[in-house]
Image (cartoon, grey):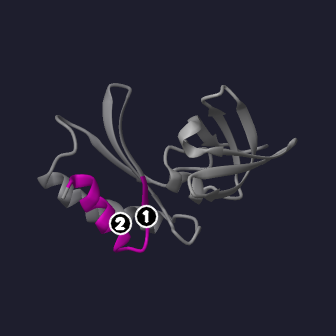
Amino acid sequence: MSLESDIKSMVESLELRVYDITTVTENDETIYRVNIISPKSEKITMDQVVQVTKMISPLLDVTAPVRGDYRLEVSSPGIERKLKSLMHFECAIGEKVKAETTEKKKLRGTLKSVASGRITLETEDGDVTFAYGDVIKAATYFEW
């Protein structure tokens, strides 16, 4: 098994899901970021973040995720987040989404459904459906 699948199994044992795992560099510091969500669409609590951190830290001590020094950061993905997989889209149903397609269409609206690899947004001009494979980039956004 890979490190990421081990982490996913550990997180799922707490009835949570891994949203994304990334490695980023900010201010010359390497950060191994694990974003978690609740499959029940509940907000992630600080206690859950601490619990996941304490659970996966020993694993990362044995199997380092990157070379050299790094900082582990466990959190929720936040209100505005990138949508990089079908699971991300499924988790965002009912939220405001902006997407750009391979046809250079820039769409904004409420994510209505995700089914059979097709995504439907409710826009000001009506419903727009497109294939997940046609998405260049997408993200949720918050309307102030």
Q: Badge 1 is on which residue?
A: 17
Quarter containing the C terminus: top right
Question: Does the segment drawn in magenta span residue 64?
Answer: no
Residue 81 lies left or right of residue 10; in this view the side is right
Q: Quadrant of residue 112?
A: bottom right
Q: Position of residue 69 (x, y in %)?
A: 20, 36
Residue 57 lies left or right of residue 42; in this view the side is left
Q: Position of residue 106 (x, y in %)?
A: 71, 31
**Label located before the other in sequence (1 or 2):** 2
Question: Does the segment drawn in magenta span residue 3?
Answer: yes
The kind of residue on which mark 1 rests is Arg
Tell me, for residue 29, which label it has, or none: none
**Residue at 64% of width from left, 32% of height from top?**
100
Q: Badge 2 is on which residue?
A: 11
Task: Return the residue found at the far left.
Answer: 62
Residue 24 lies left or right of residue 111; in this view the side is left
Residue contact between numbered discs 1 and 2, judged by CB atoms under 8 Å: yes
**Residue at 62% of width from left, 57% of height from top?**
114
Mark 1 Cα-neighbour bin, 10 Å: few <14, some 14–19, many ≥20: some
Q: Say which element carries label 1.
A: strand
The span picked out in magenta is: 2-19
Q: Position of residue 53 (x, y in %)?
A: 33, 59
- Vertical relation: 41 (above or below) 84: below
Residue 9 lies left or right of residue 116; in this view the side is left
Q: Quadrant of residue 103?
A: top right
Mark 2 Cα-neighbour bin, 10 Å: few <14, some 14–19, many ≥20: many
- Vertical relation: 73 (above or below) 30: below
Task: Return the residue found at the far right.
Answer: 125
Q: Quadrant of residue 49?
A: bottom left
Q: Say which element carries label 2.
A: helix
Q: Along the line of sight, which residue is nearer the eye, 25 or 118?
A: 118
Quarter containing the N terminus: bottom left
